[in-house]
Structures are given as structure tokens and as C-alpha cells.
Image: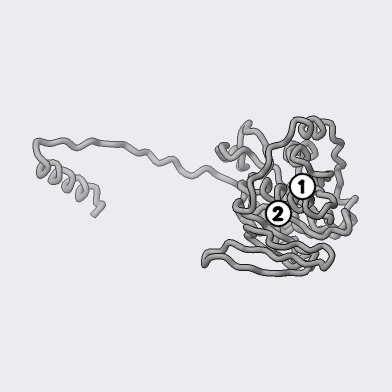
């Protein structure tokens, strides 16, 4: 069983984004693995324990963006690759999907590609289905339970969490699967796993290494600005009786043309 997990390095969820020089900035917030991707890693490791094989991590980012990858390796993943290229600086989700699809093909003989349901920095949740479309694979989204996975027959049966309730679907492998947090609690990295990950040599692939036709982005952010600051003042209305307070409040509401 050959499983790939596509992860993203993002600012810590407690970080506050601001616009600086027309660009989004998270300041000096630490960079971590996208929390939703932790559930995808855990799902992959559970399937590896059940069926054997390898779990490979693929991430796209700056050349130094390896903290998320090392977190996944510390959890127990077999190997990892980082795709980094200056031409990806302005990449949109469509470009990233083409890059991930090319990287999955380069890994070769992949049975299952796992994603978190979305990334907390962009919150779009479209990269996984876009990747599946490029690969020509079925996509099973919002999966909360993997009911059956049969590598011999090349089939997978999952339970999806949707607004109307739960939905059970089956598919042939290879397939792209996005998971929700109901799938399983991510394990904590072991001490030996952390030490092994710290020493890991993570190969870096460029676009030339992928030997793929990567399109130009269709979406761009020419400028990011902070929302205007709203000046808010508070006033506590007092009076000798509830009727007097209510009358004063009504006069102020009418005076401010709220009503």
C-alpha cells in the first residue's frame, strides 16, 4: 500500500494576519503543519499499520519550509519531499494542484492521496479536488470513517460527514481522500520519532525535476489592505428609574438615527 499525504505549512492558528506593504503578514508567528493535515497523516499511518506499505509526505513551499514535514516524519511517516521553486511564489490553488499531481506521479504507484479538508490560512478547501481532477482520480471528500480499504481488490469504502447527515460511498483506487477531524485523533510524535525527523534529509524538487507542464496562475492578489479602523465609544445610561433610563435610551437612538 503506497499512500501519499499532501500537507501545507501555515502560520500558527493563534497568529493575527495584517497587511504590510500591500502583502499579508503573520509577523513572527511560528510555522506549523496545517492542523487539518494532521488528521490526514494519522489516517495514513492507521492504514499503513493495517495494510503495510509506505506513507510519503509531499509539501509545496519555500526551501526552508520543512518544520511541517519534520512534524509528519516524527509522527511516523516513511519519507518526504518538498517542492520548492521561485516560480511558485505567486501560485494559486490551481497551480499548486498541478504541482501536487506531478509530484504524486513522480513518487509513482500511489494507491491513495490524503489531504486535510482545508488549510487554515486560505480556508478554500479546493486544492484536493483540483488535484484529483488533474490526476483523473475519484475524490472522496469530508471523510469521517474509512470503513473498508482493500488493496488487493483496489477498492475503498468510506463514510462522509455532510450537512444532511452521513453518506457511505465506495470507489476504486487510486483515489484522493480529504478527511475531517472525526476520522481519528492525531498521535503525538515519539521521542525517537522526533530525533529521527531532526536528522532527516528531505529532498527538494524544483519544477524542472517534476518535468510537468505547470500553468500560470489565474488568480492573483495585487494588493492586500487592512480594513478601516472603527472608532467605538461606550456610554452607560443611568437614571432614577427604569422608565427614565428607557426614555433617555430612546432619545439617543432616535438622535443617532438608528431608528
Question: Is disc 2 in contact with disc 1, using a CB cutoff of under 8 Å?
Answer: no
Question: Which of the 4 image quadrants contains residue 235?
Answer: top left
Relative to 44, does residue 231 appear above or below in the rendering? above
Residue 207, labelled with which disc?
none
Can residue 6 be seen here? no
Left or right of 79, for residue 114: left
Residue occupying the point 80% across, 30% down: 195
Disc 2 versus disc 1: nearer the observer: 2
Within 10 Å of the Cα at label 2, are there few (<14), some (14-19), or many (20+) other Cα atoms? many
Q: Which residue is mark 1?
A: 60
Q: Which residue is mark 2?
A: 115
> Which sits in the foreground, 4 or 238?
4
Residue occupying the point 37% across, 38% down: 231
Question: Which of the 4 image quadrants contains residue 102?
Answer: bottom right
Relative to 34, does residue 135 appear above or below in the rendering? below
- Could you tell me which secondary element the residue under label 1 belongs to? strand
Can residue 187 be seen here? yes
Q: Position of residue 105 (x, y in %)?
A: 86, 58
Which badge, 2 or 1, is on the more N-terminal residue? Answer: 1
Q: Position of residue 126 (x, y in %)?
A: 66, 59
Residue occupying the point 55% across, 38% down: 16
- Could you tell me which secondary element the residue under label 2 belongs to? strand
Q: Position of residue 217 (x, y in %)?
A: 73, 57
Alpha-carbon distance for marks 2 and 1? Answer: 13 Å
Amino acid at each position: 500500500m503506497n499512500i501519499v499525504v499532501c500537507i501545507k505549512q501555515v502560520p500558527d492558528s493563534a497568529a493575527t494576519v495584517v497587511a504590510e506593504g500591500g502583502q499579508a503578514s503573520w509577523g513572527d508567528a511560528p510555522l506549523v503543519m496545517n492542523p487539518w493535515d494532521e488528521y490526514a497523516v494519522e489516517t495514513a499511518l492507521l492504514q499503513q499499520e493495517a495494510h503495510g506499505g509506505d506513507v510519503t509526505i509531499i509539501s509545496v513551499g519555500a526551501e526552508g519550509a520543512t518544520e511541517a514535514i519534520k512534524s509528519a516524519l516524527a509522527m511516523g511517516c516513511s519519507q518526504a519531499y518538498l517542492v520548492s521553486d521561485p516560480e511558485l511564489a505567486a501560485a494559486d490553488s490551481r497551480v499548486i494542484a498541478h504541482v501536487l499531481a506531478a509530484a504524486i506521479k513522480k513518487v509513482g504507484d500511489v494507491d491513495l492521496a490524503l489531504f486535510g479538508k482545508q488549510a487554515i490560512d486560505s480556508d478554500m478547501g479546493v486544492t484536493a479536488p483540483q488535484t484529483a481532477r488533474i490526476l483523473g482520480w475519484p475524490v472522496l471528500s469530508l471523510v469521517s470513517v474509512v470503513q473498508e480499504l482493500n488493496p488487493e481488490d483496489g477498492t475503498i469504502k468510506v463514510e462522509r460527514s455532510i450537512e444532511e447527515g452521513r453518506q457511505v460511498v465506495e470507489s476504486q483506487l487510486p483515489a484522493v481522500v480529504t478527511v475531517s477531524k472525526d476520522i481519528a485523533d492525531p498521535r503525538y510524535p515519539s521521542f525517537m520519532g522526533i530525533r529521527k525527523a531532526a536528522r532527516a534529509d528531505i529532498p527538494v524538487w524544483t519544477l524542472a525535476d517534476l518535468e510537468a507542464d505547470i500553468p500560470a496562475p489565474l488568480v492573483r492578489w495585487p494588493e492586500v489592505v487592512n480594513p478601516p479602523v472603527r472608532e467605538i465609544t461606550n456610554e452607560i445610561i443611568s437614571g432614577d428609574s427604569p422608565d427614565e433610563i428607557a426614555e433617555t435610551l430612546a432619545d439617543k437612538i432616535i438622535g443617532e438615527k438608528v431608528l
